[in-house]
Image: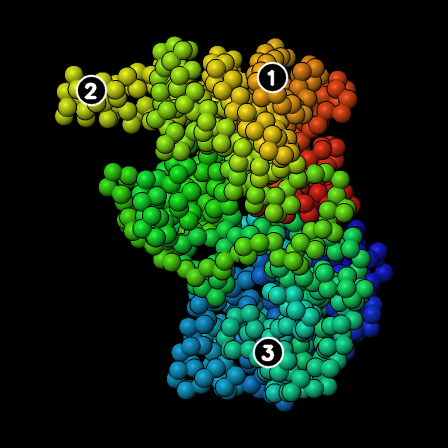
């Protein structure tokens, strides 16, 4: 097998993805620049196949690799007229990583390889520059020591700081040859002390060790973490480029820099980057000296700048995308070291795509395909100012994006009270329940010690557009004393913290935030309109309030795919009535309490239907078990005990609390997720669903009588048998017909079900005999398919499963195509086979995750529904799925 390609050989491979897959992004870029005749140093690339076979062989070179490297090295010597290890004319090389996609800073690089005690003298004589030679040697020892031998870099840096202080030098460039020569000896002593052997003088051994180190860096912790976050497969591997060194530290006519063909932060069409004269590449990254702007190069070396500007424009036109360029100037001669597609902010990505279309470089279809849909999330949430120094004290799950700073409160009531005083808070809870919703509304963000990305806190926060960090294991909360421990630090009520729901990070203190725009910017609206022209699926939103519905509509939602009714019960003025309903001893008493709730529910539905006038609104009837609306069993046991001891067993307060305790004990279930909930609740207590359906259609009829166009759909949760579907459908239809008769108004509506049980998928043809639409509730469908309790799983074993690669993705965040997806496919085929034209969508949180949206498009679903702030993501992802750039 061929493992090694010279840059000009690589240019003979098919351009595009296949070349990048084999040579990595860096190797492919160097091959294409070489083919275009651009000034690129000589060198060769070791393929990603070699890396993968290296791992297959347990960390050994695959058969034939060493021979191919030796042969390529001999060819490189011939091309450069230099000799590897020669004292007279030494060949020095850089050894760099290069995965098929950019992973900036995640893997390792070694420069100046080939220097030893003999070649350094030859380099000094050849260049007539002793300072340069010894500076290059100390850099090589530092990089080799830290990358190959795992010696902490600060061990070397401390000696350099000491040398600068003793000589009065302001920076490294002012240290002379003698100082560097002395530091080289001290560096070699550090190597000997840590490695237990002298610094290697055999240059071929140096090269072999460096290649192994780059291969190893593919599985370094930082690289693995980066891949997890960016969903990059582990089986891609990295290529290795071995390139003749060119030196930016040979004097004032030399230098090095990194530049972008457009501003990666704003999208502005102008060269953007930094340059350091008399320096090597790592100096720019390490911040050892303050770099100059790339535009300063025009003043310092105008001819070189003009050549670089021309090359930058040429590369951008060739790739039809913004390029990230690395370059070195050696004694006035420009060398290109890298070109790759530039990382950019979401704002820059959209604006660049718009500009490239306006300039005639690309068409709208390509523009829609080149913006990362998930990245749009950045635009709708506050984020920490990138200039802030963030001291992370702990990390949880990035449950709802955005950043928030506020003072710590430990109860929902305190969050409300503090807000009324004009104070910003972060609600810190062990975990949230529906009882906490009013506090979540009042708080700037939510931090929980337990729970996952689909926990109550996460789902509600995403719907509200509030940041949430969930499952922060390092958090220990004492609600009674209103204190918490976090990573060895005490946190008390009123302390300031900043949470970042995009990364899961938590920091002490109030960090500066950048606020999102209050409306969809014109440039983004234009871009998303191009996506809308290309997509097939509709995009709806999950919204529980008129405000959420209006926000979703402004962001482009074409309907409401899930309106949860349980959150409406948790308002402080309603909760006592809900308690009366639950505590009722018979249906008549229950009806009395429900009659009090009816006006509230009618107003709720009227507000949402009005906000979505002319668009469908899918209202899910009550889903959770009743005990969730009552205090917890543990809390009631404590409270009744305290009341009995302080007030006495005959006191009215004790009797009321004791009655509630007995009711909670009656309702208590061993496994409430599979107990008296969803449609089962509506069948056992039919008056609850009757009230809700009546409220829906009274609100709709009232709006229609005023000239509005309400379009309600009723969704029965958790149906698993055709009998459940028929019973609940018939009951809902009876109420709707009764309301129409009372009001003298009719309007179109549908009754369907949320498909969230495996059995529902396998009998979808039977359900479709009565259901007029299906909406996949993939949060619970995932839970019931895997047999995982989602909150417990994400807080306990799922992180371990991901680390051990038992799971490649968290199935509650990225749709499981093989298992859950197969059930969905079966349901779609059976449902459409039984009812022609049945509308089918998805309303789980997967509806806003791009790869899951692509899967739904492949299934032929009619719509996806997601949190309001994820609507733009889903709009773009649906378009990319339709044109085949997202699969």
Q: CA distance from mark 1 to mark 3?
A: 75 Å
Q: Earlier in the sequence, mark 3 or mark 2?
A: 3
Which of 708/531 is in front?
A: 708
Identify the secondary structure beneath mark 1. helix
Label 3 SS: strand
Q: Position of residue 228 (x, y in %)?
A: 57, 47
Horizontal and vertical percent position of residue 591:
42, 15
Residue 148 lies in quadrant: bottom right
Disc 2 or disc 1, which is closer to the eye? 1
- The answer, for residue 787, to whether it is visible in the render is no
Whichever of labels 2 and 1 marks the residue nearer the N terminus, that label is 2
Per the image, label 2 sits on a secondary structure element best described as: helix
Asked if the residues shown at circle 1 and circle 3 are in contact, with their CB atoms under 8 angstroms apart, the answer is no
Point 61% across, 86% down: residue: 251
Provide residue 649's location: percent of width, then percent of height: 17, 17
Decide: is 528 above or below 621: below
Distance, label 2 to label 1, CA atoms, is 45 Å
Which sits in the foreground, 84 or 377?
377
Query: Residue beneath label 2, please?
Result: 652
Q: Quadrant of residue 129?
A: bottom right
Residue 741 marker: 1
Residue wearing tag 3: 293
């Amino acid at each position: 097998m061929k493992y090694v390609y010279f840059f000009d050989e690589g240019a003979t491979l098919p351009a595009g993805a296949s070349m990048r897959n084999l040579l990595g992004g860096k190797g492919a870029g160097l091959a294409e620049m070489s083919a275009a005749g651009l000034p690129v140093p000589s060198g060769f690339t070791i393929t990603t196949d070699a890396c993968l076979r290296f791992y297959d062989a347990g960390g050994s070179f695959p058969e034939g690799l060493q021979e191919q490297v030796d042969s390529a090295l001999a060819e490189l010597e011939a091309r450069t007229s230099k000799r590897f290890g020669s004292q007279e004319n030494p060949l020095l090389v850089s050894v760099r990583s290069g995965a098929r996609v950019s992973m900036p800073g995640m893997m390792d690089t070694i420069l100046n390889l080939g220097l030893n005690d003999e070649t350094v003298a030859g380099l000094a004589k050849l260049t007539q520059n002793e300072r340069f030679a010894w500076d290059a040697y100390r850099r090589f020892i530092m990089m080799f020591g830290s990358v190959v031998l795992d010696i902490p870099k600060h061990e070397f840096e401390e000696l350099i700081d000491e040398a600068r202080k003793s000589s009065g030098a302001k920076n490294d460039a002012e240290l002379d040859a003698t100082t560097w020569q002395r530091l080289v000896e001290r560096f070699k002593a550090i190597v000997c002390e840590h490695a237990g052997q002298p610094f290697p003088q055999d240059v071929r051994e140096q090269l072999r060790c460096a290649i192994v180190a780059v291969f190893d860096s593919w599985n370094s912790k930082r690289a693995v973490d980066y891949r997890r976050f960016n969903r990059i497969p582990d089986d891609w591997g990295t290529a290795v480029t071995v390139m003749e060194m060119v030196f930016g530290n040979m004097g004032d006519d030399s230098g090095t820099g990194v530049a972008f063909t457009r501003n990666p932060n704003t999208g502005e069409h102008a060269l953007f980057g930094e340059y350091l004269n008399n320096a090597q590449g790592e100096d720019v990254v390490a911040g050892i000296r303050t770099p100059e702007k790339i535009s300063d190069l025009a003043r310092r070396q105008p001819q070189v700048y003009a050549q670089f500007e021309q090359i930058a424009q040429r590369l951008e036109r060739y790739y039809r995308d913004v390029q990230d360029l690395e370059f070195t100037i050696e004694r006035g001669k420009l060398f290109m070291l890298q070109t790759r597609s530039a990382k950019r902010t979401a704002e820059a990505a959209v604006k660049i795509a718009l500009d490239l279309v306006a300039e005639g470089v690309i068409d709208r279809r390509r523009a829609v395909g080149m913006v990362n849909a998930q990245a749009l999330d950045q635009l709708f949430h506050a984020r920490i100012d990138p200039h802030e120094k963030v001291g992370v004290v702990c990390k949880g799950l990035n449950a709802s994006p955005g950043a928030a700073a506020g003072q710590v409160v430990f109860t929902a009531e305190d969050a409300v009270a503090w807000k009324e005083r004009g104070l910003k808070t972060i609600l810190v809870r062990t975990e949230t329940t529906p009882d906490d919703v009013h506090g979540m509304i009042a708080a700037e963000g939510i931090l929980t010690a337990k729970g996952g990305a689909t926990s109550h806190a996460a789902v509600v926060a995403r719907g509200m557009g509030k940041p949430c960090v969930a499952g922060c294991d390092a958090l220990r909360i004492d609600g009674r004393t209103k204190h918490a421990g976090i990573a060895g630090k005490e946190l008390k009520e009123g302390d300031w913290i900043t949470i970042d729901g995009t990364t899961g990070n938590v920091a002490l203190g109030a960090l500066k935030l950048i606020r999102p725009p209050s409306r969809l910017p014109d440039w983004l609206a234009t871009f998303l309109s191009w996506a809308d022209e290309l997509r097939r699926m509709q995009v709806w939103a999950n919204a529980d309030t008129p405000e959420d519905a209006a926000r979703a509509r402004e962001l482009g939602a074409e309907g409401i795919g899930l309106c949860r009714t349980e959150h409406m019960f948790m308002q402080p003025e309603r909760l006592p009535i809900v308690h009366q309903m639950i505590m009722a001893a018979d249906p008549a008493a229950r009806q009395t309490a429900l009659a009090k709730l009816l006006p509230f529910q009618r107003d709720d539905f009227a507000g949402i239907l009005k906000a979505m006038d002319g668009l469908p609104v899918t209202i899910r009837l009550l889903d959770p078990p009743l005990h969730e609306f009552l205090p917890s069993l543990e809390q009631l046991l404590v409270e009744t005990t305290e009341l009995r001891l302080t007030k006495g067993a005959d006191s009215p307060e004790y009797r009321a609390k004791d009655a509630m305790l007995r009711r909670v004990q009656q309702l208590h279930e061993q496994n409430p997720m599979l107990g008296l909930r969803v449609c089962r609740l509506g069948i056992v207590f039919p008056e609850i669903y009757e009230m809700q359906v009546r409220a829906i259609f009274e609100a709709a009829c009232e709006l229609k009588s005023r000239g509005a166009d309400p379009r309600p759909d009723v969704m029965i949760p958790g149906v698993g048998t055709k009998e459940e579907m028929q019973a609940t459908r018939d009951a809902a239809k009876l109420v709707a017909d009764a309301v129409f008769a009372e009001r003298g108004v009719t309007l179109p509506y549908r009754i369907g079900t949320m498909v969230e049980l495996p059995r529902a998928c396998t009998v979808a043809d039977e359900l479709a005999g009565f259901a007029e639409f299906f909406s996949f509730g993939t949060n619970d469908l995932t839970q019931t398919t895997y047999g995982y309790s989602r909150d417990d799983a994400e807080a306990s074993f799922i992180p371990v499963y991901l680390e051990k690669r038992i799971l490649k993705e968290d199935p509650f965040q990225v749709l499981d195509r093989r298992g859950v997806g197969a059930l969905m496919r079966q349901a779609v085929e059976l449902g459409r086979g039984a009812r022609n034209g049945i509308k089918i969508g998805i309303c789980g949180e997967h509806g806003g995750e791009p790869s899951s949206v692509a899967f739904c498009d492949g299934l032929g679903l009619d719509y996806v529904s997601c949190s309001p702030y994820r609507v733009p993501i889903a709009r773009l992802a649906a378009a990319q799925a339709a044109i085949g750039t997202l699969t």
